[in-house]
Image (cartoon, rainbow, N blue to C red):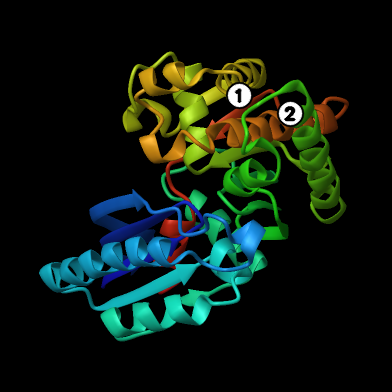
Amino acid sequence: MRLAAIDCGTNTIRLLIGDYELTDQGIIINELERSGEIVRLGVGVDRTGRLNEEAIERTLDFTRACAERFEHYGVQQARFVATSASRDAANRDVFVNGVWAILGFEPEVISGEEEAALAFLGSKVGSNVDMTHPRLVVDLGGGSTEFSLGTQYPDAYISTNMGSGRVTERFLSEGVTPASEAAAREFVRSMLDTAAEQVDFSAAHSLVGLAGTITAVTAHALGLEYFDSQKIGGAQVPVEDMRRSCDAIIHATPEQLEQWEFIAPGRRSVIAAGALICDEMVARVAADTANTDHPVRHINVSLHDILDGIALSQL
């Protein structure tokens, strides 16, 4: 079946089109197109509680392009999922109605828990991570970060209201200073404490990281000059290397950020907050598993995430 999936997050909107076939041996996937754009739909939502009109229009422009791709490929079934920014916005009906007018069906504004479950499902695509023991999947987004723990399926999951955009707006909108960094770290640690009450980090035998912040930090840790999906997808990065790269990105000057081509221009304004969340997250998971017989010493990076989960959920 030819399926399409659209993931509309706080920072980005992305499209996946492919042929999916269920067989006795598993799922055969032939990916036809994967694209996306940074539209910053969630800009200002944490402060105002509303979606910005210009951000809505940027998102609808990409949705119109998706409609054209649906027709081009002869898509048989599609699912449009909207996450953190849309959940939190008082005027989300304007966005929902706009999508319906273009595609003929409504986007689903899903819960944080379903977002976590879909991210876990998508992370299984092409994974080289051991699935016989619990793995912790972390989807670090713009408005929220999801944690899910399980083997083949998540046994526990939670969505937390911390993301690169949200932390930027609350703490780092004027830049990174010792005071603002300390306040941001205190907030992130409190969110990790909340997550750990629902998802037992110490039970994780492996850590899987998803989404743009983590892939950008990975590119830095690997010493890449630009975003190379062949090297980033499936990479296993030691915790120490990941934390060093997080620190470099958090304290980078605007000129340095411009020189790093692996960070998309639309992500530069929120990457420091994203790297700070990533740093605290990998440090916490490493610490919580340190005294077990399965210490987590590296992060497994996947380019397959909630977008793939949205596609697979239609089978």
For residue 265, which quarter of the picture?
top left
279 lies left or right of 70:
right
Residue 96 spot, x, y in % from top left: 44, 79
- Mark 2 highlights which residue? 181
Determine the residue positioned at 59% across, 71% down: 89
What amino acid type should be assigned to the residue bearing mark 1? Ile
Out of 257 and 299, give the one closest to the viewer: 257
Q: Which mark is residue 138?
A: none
The mark that comes first in sequence, 1 or 2, is: 2
What amino acid type should be assigned to the residue bearing mark 2? Glu
Badge 1, how many Cα within 10 Å: few under 14, some, many 20+?
many
Residue extending farthest to the front is 174
Q: Quadrant of the C terminus?
A: bottom left
Secondary structure under badge 2?
helix
250 lies left or right of 32:
right
Residue 174 spot, x, y in % from top left: 62, 34
Residue 199 spot, x, y in % from top left: 79, 52
- Mark 1 highlights which residue? 250
Q: CA distance from mark 1 to mark 2?
A: 9 Å
Determine the residue positioned at 34% across, 66% down: 57
Residue 194 spot, x, y in % from top left: 84, 51
Image: 79 above or below 204: below
Out of 106 and 27, give the one closest to the viewer: 106
